[in-house]
Amino acid sequence: CWPAARMNAFQSLLYRKAPETGHAVHRISNLDDLDDVLWPGEVVFHAHWFGPLSFKLESEADYRVNVEEAFDKFGSFRDRTGAKFLWTAHNLLPHGTSYPETDIVLRQKVISEFDGVHFLGDGHEDLLEQAFRRTPKKSFVARHPHYRGAYADQTERFDARERLGFDPAVTPILFFGSIQAYKGIGRLISAFQEARQRGRPDLRLVIAGFPSDEDYIAAIAGRIEDDEAILFVPSKIPDDQVQIYFRGADVPVRP
């Protein structure tokens, strides 16, 4: 499994029954760790995101070099272990990519050279083929799991709202997740403020989640600093506190 994603419960949910089917999951963060995989039996290299290949680079040329080196490592690993290669297609392109041309080339190579693609929903394969003009060798759909049971959930609604500082009469709306520009949080704030002005003074907005971009966080904070109806929590929310936000809100919103 590459890259290992410890902050998101998705991979844990995806792999949790692997031992029951005779599979052992080895998570790696660096492709150099493939040299340490010595399992003599059947091996599947399962890729999720290719972001590590483009982190903290100064040019698209550097990204191209990283892509070529990665595929050299994939080839060496395949030659040594006979591994099958699988990609889970989470999205067409990385969110906010700085190098879309190389990302397109990378995905075309993955689709053409990997043994299969895992899709998270019906219709996704058509989107992929339209975008990259490539057809996977094999494909299957296994839907994204829900998170029920992945987080603690024993807090009652009243207690959760009290901890968030909400009066029982208000109507809290929740945005939860990593705080990134592509998610439309600015439009959410505008719509929320307009709704309050149009006769819904009971509405409250909670924006909580991991702060992925310092400049974007500062821009949001500056925009809402005088709005007491908005609770802004730009931080990694501990797993045991996720329930506070979801039990305390009346509805989650995905702008």
Image (cartoon, grey):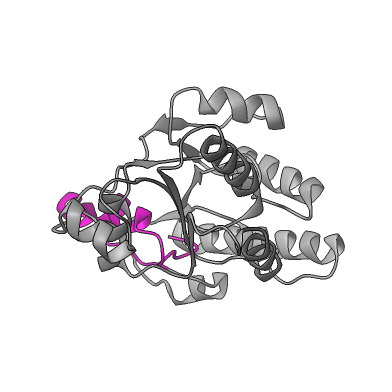
Closer to the camera, 52 or 242? 242
Residue at left offset 56%, top offset 44%: 114
Q: Residue 253 in the image: x percent, y percent?
A: 45, 40
In the foreground, 225 or 25? 225
Residue at horizontal 54 percent and vertical 41 percent from the top = 192
Q: Position of residue 161 (x, y in %)?
A: 27, 57
Label the magenta part by its dominant secondary structure. loop
Q: Quadrant of residue 76?
A: bottom right
Residue drawn at point x = 25 percent, y = 50 percent: 168
Q: Is residue 151 visible?
A: no
Residue 184 belongs to magenta span: no
Count the labels in the image. 0
Identify the residue at horizontal 52%, vertical 43% (top origin). Answer: 90
Q: Which residues are magenta?
A: 1-27
Pick the front one: 196 or 112? 196
Residue 229 against residue 203 in the figure, above or below: below
- Indicate the position of residue 36 as horizontal and vertical percent values: 45, 77
Q: Is any part of residue 193 visible from this angle?
A: yes
Whether residue 20 is in magenta: the answer is yes
Q: Position of residue 66 (x, y in %)?
A: 73, 65
Image quarter hosting the N terminus: bottom left
Q: Is residue 103 left or right of residue 82?
A: right
* Position above or below: 105 against 49: above
Quadrant housing the C terminus: top right
Q: Quadrant of residue 52?
A: bottom right
Q: In the image, 224: left or right of 3? A: right
Determine whether, in the image, residue 41 is placed left or right of residue 223: left
Does 62 appear above or below 202? Answer: below
Snapshot quadrant of residue 213: bottom right
